[in-house]
Image (cartoon, rainbow, N blue to C red):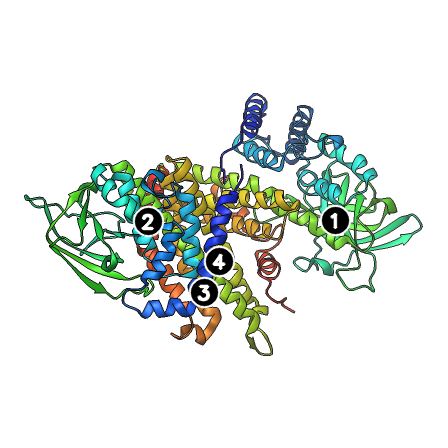
Amino acid sequence: MDLTLSPAEEAFRDELREWLEANNPGREPAGDEAAFQFRLAWQRKLHEAGWAGVSWPKEYGGRGATLIEQAIFNEEVVRARTPSVANVLALAMGGPTVIAHGTEEQRKRYLPPILSGDEIWCQGFSEPGAGSDLASLKTRAVRHGDEWVVTGQKVWTTFAHHAKWCMLVARTDPEAPKHKGLTYFLMDMEQDAVQVRPLRQITGESEFNELFIEEARIPHENIVGAEGEGWGVAITTLMHERATLAFGLQVSVQIALRELIDSAHETRGDNGHVATEDPVIRQHLAQLLIESEVLRLNAYRGLSAVMRSGVPGPEGSLGKWHWSEVNQSLTEVAMEIAGPRAMLADDNWTYRFLRSRANSIEGGTTEILKNIVAERVLGLPRMR
Amino acid sequence: MNFGFSDDQQAIKRTAREFLAARYPLATVRQLAEDDRGFTDAQWQEIAELGWPGVIIPEERGGLGLGVIELVVIAEEMGYALAPSPWFSTTCAALMLTAAGTEAQRERWLEPLASGEARGTLAVWDEHAGWAPDHSEVEPGPDGTLSSVKIAVPDAASADFVIVSGADGRHYLHNVSDPGITLVAEAGIDPTRKLSRVELDGAAVEPLEHAPDKIALAYATIVTLLAAENVGAAQRAMEMAVTYAKDRNQFDRPIGSYQAVSHRCAQMLLEVEGARSLSYWAGWALDNEPDTGPRAASMAKAYAGDAGFRVTASALQVHGGIGFTYEHDLHFFLKRAHANGHAFGDSRWHRDRVADLAGV
């Protein structure tokens, strides 16, 4: 057991830190389009310096670094408070899925423009009638010669209005059992048959969209994996979402917690005492410090397992589930510390408090993640 | 960066798992729980032959000269097997002596401790103690003798010496064969660890060196071992619950197919793995990053103290009525995990310490 970085890993981190210090563009501008352009410019800068796709193979434009170095990267960019990159879904999920299940032609075609930011990706999994029960989705794809014609509706589609490609899971065989009749496509978003409408969320923003698909065309060669095997490919995407995002998420929790402790030092609670002197608040903050440490340690333990086996396992579900609980309780403690200011809508703690409600839903509800842990890690019988 | 055990550490873990499974099946644990002494000389001899009493004792004193992480590995397996043994109390004594024993005390005791010929224990809590792991108001009289009462002292009845904590972080060694000590067996909630009330009345003692920093690290190590024991005990209780949830049918299907039960089991895994990560990290930090060690140890103790009780209690709930019977073995794990949660500072105390150390 060695929980320190090797000299090579340390050199990687130091080089990255130095580069981030010199190149961090700072806070995003307000406004959706301006923020997107800002993120895109940042991604291009990362790409030109060789920091996009850290663990992706060099032949597709990646850096060819280890998974540990990828994790260090994910931690450091959060620590440096850089903006997000524009193509986060393709980097975290789409690309790794193409690397795992795509053909050589697909890897050469799709991976480089992901890294350069020339082609943005979105994810078309959830539907109004298929959330947790994703495999019951109804978007239909019918083959016509070398093309598939797709009709249906998708929801919670982040970045749809900027995207060139959509990771689309559609039903290609309505006769087959529900998990077997699905196929994973890369759908070109630049066609009239695909309409994007923003979805307003409880924070008032619109991070997500609805997608209305009316006889959209997808060439047969845009299938990832085989026809009818879309479920397995989609699972790869979701596992990557849960495993690789964990590194950035745990650091963002630690940063938020540090900010919360700082703000607690400046907040008057009962009888004019500083909030951090309140024994109950101290207990809450200490518990958050402990839980955020667990997130960090579990992420590294999970990574050691991935490095042994090559693919993220169902244990990744624990991290996403735990993170959502920790982040939600962090914002709840923030509301306790805020006192009457908890009634006011602001762009910091009350915003985060509302936004965190989605944490236990997005990327797999906590209930589904518990099912996965129970069935696939503990081997308990399936619900039905 | 590698969050896995070395080959040697894995070998220790494997040996411990196999040895303890062979020698301490739950029928044996139950027998020892009902026995006043709680272990046999033959059982202690076997543990001594494995070198476990001397894991952290330097090689030149006859020990293995290994680190805290190796102790953590053994403690987790001891918790998993729930093996009743004076190993923990003797390890506490060895930690105190290696941290702050005088040259004469080390010369006298470390080799016999390492070989298993002698056993020691640590008497910490005053009769009216609070929640702190090591707070005491005991001071020697003008003649250098100690008069005080300590409660819940583990394995004192079978120890050759007792290290007694006093005011100002000072510690004193009393040789049990000297006059001035009375031991009264105390019924512990956890019958797999034998407790005594230690009454000192003009007992001759030798002070240990006054070395607060080293003593603090010894205590940090002790709480890390209790955290690791709770990881093992909780892991075992979770396995029992999962097995039961697969086998037990109600309403014509295994109860583990109901989410009310299966989600409870998933929650157990979350807490067991969290406690495990923290206790491994604390063990590693105490060996490699002493500045981080006390914070990591308090985090591990706070989390594993809560998780140990919650997981074993949740496992009991999964078992339903049978889990509440004395005949079922589950309650032994619940009792150990609960008692460990309150030994050497409870979770609340350690959380407060985490807050202090993190600048809250």
Residue identified by numbered label 1: A211
* Secondary structure of residue under mark 2: helix
Residue identified by numbered label 4: B18
Residue identified by numbered label 2: B115
Q: To which chain does the residue with label 2 belong?
A: B
Q: Is there any visible trace of residue B345 in the rendered image? A: no
Q: Nearer the viewer, mark 1 or mark 3?
A: 3
Q: To which chain does the residue with label 1 belong?
A: A
Residue identified by numbered label 3: B314
Q: Residues within 10 Å of mark 4 (few under 14, many from 20)?
A: some
- Image position of B108 (left or right of B146): right
Amino acid type at circle 4 is Glu
Quarter placement of the C terminus of chain B: top left
Residue A157 is situated, as x and y percent measured from the top left of the image, at: 69, 47
Residue ID at (45%, 69%): B317
Q: To which chain does the residue with label 3 belong?
A: B
Q: Badges 3 and 2: C-beta atoms under 8 Å apart?
A: no
Q: Nearer the viewer, mark 4 or mark 2?
A: 2
Q: Nearer the viewer, mark 3 or mark 2?
A: 2
Label 4 vs label 2: CA separation? 22 Å
Q: Are marks 1 and 3 on the same chain?
A: no
Amino acid type at circle 1 is Leu
Amino acid type at circle 2 is Ser
Residue A332: image tag? none
